[in-house]
Amino acid sequence: MFIHRCNCMYIPPDVLENLAKAGVDEARVSIQQSELSRVKRSAKEIGMEAFTGVTTAPAGTASRQIYNCKNQWKQRVDLARGEGDPVTSDDAVNEAYEYAGAVRDYYKNVLNRNSVDNLGMNLLFNVHYGTKYMNAFWDGDEMTFGDGDGKIFVSFARSLDVVAHELTHGVTQFTANLKYYSQSGALNEHFSDVFGSVITQYKKGQTAHDADWLIGDEIMGPELYGEALRSMKAPGTAYDNKLMGKDRQPDHMKDYYSGPKDNQGVHINSGILNRAFYLAATDTLGTDKAALIWYTALQRLWSTAVFNDAVEVIVESARLLVKSGQVPAGSVQTVRAAFKAVGLPR
């Protein structure tokens, strides 16, 4: 099977473009470096460029390896902390280590998944990537975090939501392998938002009704503190300011974005599906049961799946889990109603 290794960026391109238009030089540089990263990724895929650095832990042990890029525009510059090593004086290194463990342990202990690939894949993290880099990304093999500019965005490694979101792109890569384009790409982003929020709630001991359902609020700097990148509860309301622009996420298929930007709306149209998950979780399911249904469906989807396909598979997954006694009776109807509320299937 061909593996779609996307360069999945945490900050949507339209946000960076709006920041650049507002005169934020760090956003302009971040856009350029993100494109260079994509090109390097493509070169690695066809064997034109060797991977940077050497991993040290035995393969297949789900070991954490946190590298300090030392503000260079390359990965794996210096191994700062390996599995079992003591804490360091670098907060970004320690936070990446802790949150990588939290995501790994959630997938293992709750969903019985052995790391990203279910085969104990080691977790390679890069912190302090570049200079004031305004993004984080999964590139098909490892995670990379910028420090932000300290004003609009702070270190991306400080957020469990960011870590869980990006590592879930890896889980998707090794399950449904969803293409990062149009509706399959929006599904890819949706599953990452789901498990970014689910794992954060799990770590904090929150319920569906306690959670804020915000994505990206933890990395907002002092100039935009209180804003977020997305809201699963109310898509389209996460931000509205002169720097970032206005949140374009729809919460219903009637407002579906069909334009060419953002790989045909992968970060935009995911809002419709995010709203459906929120509705299902806050109805009678609760976050944990909803997450089990969605994870079961993720393993049964395919690379070119579109929204209607996902609805069918998620509803069918709920039915199978009701039959096996893993989710309560009525879950199928709850899921179906959640999708109907956002105009799906269409």
Image (cartoon, grey):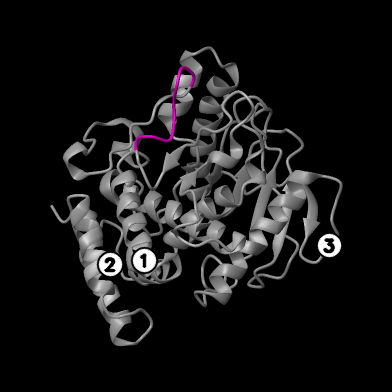
Give the magenta part as a residue range.
236-243
- Left or right of 346? Residue 270 is right
Mark 3 Cα within 10 Å, few/some/many (few <14, many 20+)?
few
Q: Nearer the viewer, mark 2 or mark 3?
A: 2
Q: Which residue is the site of mark 1?
A: 294
Amino acid at pointer 3: Asp
- Residue 296 visible in the picture: yes
Instruction: Please name the residue shown 28% across and 47% down the image.
Output: 272
Mark 1 Cα within 10 Å, few/some/many (few <14, many 20+)?
many
Find out whether residue 162 is within the magenta segment.
no
Residue 61 image offset from top left, x and y in percent: 67, 73
Which comes before the other along the chain, label 2 or label 1? 1
Q: Nearer the viewer, residue 266 or 41?
A: 266
Relative to residue 73, is residue 5 depicted above or below? Answer: below
Q: Which residue is the site of mark 2?
A: 314
Q: CA distance from mark 3 to mark 1?
A: 34 Å
Amino acid at pointer 1: Trp
Q: Are marks 2 and 1 in contact (CB under 8 Å)?
A: yes
User: Which quarter shows the N terminus?
Assistant: bottom left
Amino acid at pointer 2: Ile
Give the secondary structure at mark 3: loop
Which comes before the other along the chain, label 2 or label 3? 3
Q: CA distance from mark 2 to mark 3?
A: 40 Å
Q: Which residue is the site of mark 3?
A: 85
- Residue 54 visible in the picture: no
